Structures are given as structure tokens and as C-alpha cells.
Amino acid sequence: QVQLVESGGGSVQAGGSLRLSCAASGYTYTPTCQGWFRQAPGKEREGVAVIRTSSGSTQYADSVKDRFTISQDNASRTLYLQMNSLNPADTAMYYCASGPMYGGVCPIAPSGMTVWGKGTLVTISS
């Protein structure tokens, strides 16, 4: 059974940085797409960044472009999200997930993912 475990969340002041990690276990296959998603209180879950495992190609939500970087270590089956220039709007529970491609593209919509972690909380204070 595949398990995804996120870590690295915490509380930081605006302008600070955090690095999230997602450790995967139980895979008997290589996931096609992996990504980070977040859900703020009272809001729907949204895509933050996705990466195609084989090529490393990435896609970001407009709200995090040039501030967040998604990366992967295929050897250790670990997914990362480097978050810089954090602001209070980034406060949310952050989840990692994996899933298939659709139409040759890794979806940034949460509905496209099939395996989910339980999340790690990120809180940004002003």
C-alpha cells in the first residue's frame, strides 16, 4: 500500500522560507505525476505545483510562481517543495499527492491525483 508522509511544515514570519518534504513508500511502480496541493481554512483544495517524474517538467500555480520550487529525488522517492518569500496568504495545510497524466499533461487540479498524504501545516504570520 502506497503511503505519502509530508514533513517540514511550521510557523514562520512573512518573508521567510520553508522546505517541505514528502517521503513515499510502498510503490510498486513509478508514479507518473507528483505534486503539492494546499487547503486554507474555509477554502477548497488547490494545486500549488506538479512535476512529471520521468522528465522533471514542472507546472506552478500563478500565485506561487517565482517563489516556490518543486523538486524530486527519485532515488529516495522523496518530493520537495522549497517555499520562499512566504506571505500570510500561503497559510494552509499542504499535501503531497501522485497520480496519472491526462492528455499528456500532469494535472495541477487536485481531482487529477489518486494517492494523497495526510498533510503538513504551514502558518505564516505578518
Image (cartoon, rainbow, N blue to C red):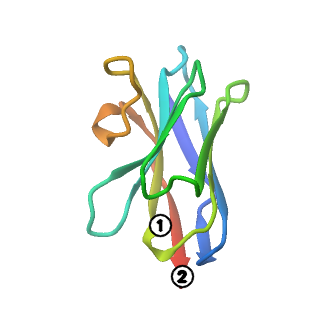
* Residue drawn where x is 39% and y is 24% of the image: 105
Instruction: Tell me which corner region of the image, top left, top right, bottom left or bottom right, holds residue 111.
Output: top left
The mark found on residue 90 in the picture is: 1
Q: Nearer the viewer, residue 117 or 13?
A: 13
- Kindly identify which residue carries mark 2: 125
- The mark nearer the N terminus, 2 or 1, is 1
Q: Amino acid at mark 1?
A: Asp
In the displayed structure, 114 sits above or below 92; it is above
Instruction: Work out whether residue 50 can be spotted.
Output: yes
The percent position of residue 108, horizontal first and vertical second, equals 38, 39
Q: Secondary structure at mark 1?
A: helix
Instruction: Work out whether residue 1 can be spotted.
Output: no
Mark 2 neighbour density, 10 Å: few (under 14) some (14–19) many (20 or more): some
* Residue drawn where x is 48% and y is 76% of the image: 88
Q: Amino acid at mark 2?
A: Ser
The percent position of residue 125, horizontal first and vertical second, equals 54, 82
Q: CA distance from mark 2 to mark 1?
A: 10 Å
Q: Image check: 121 left or right of 17?
A: left
Q: Nearer the viewer, residue 87 or 19?
A: 87
The percent position of residue 18, horizontal first and vertical second, equals 65, 62
The percent position of residue 6, horizontal first and vertical second, equals 57, 48
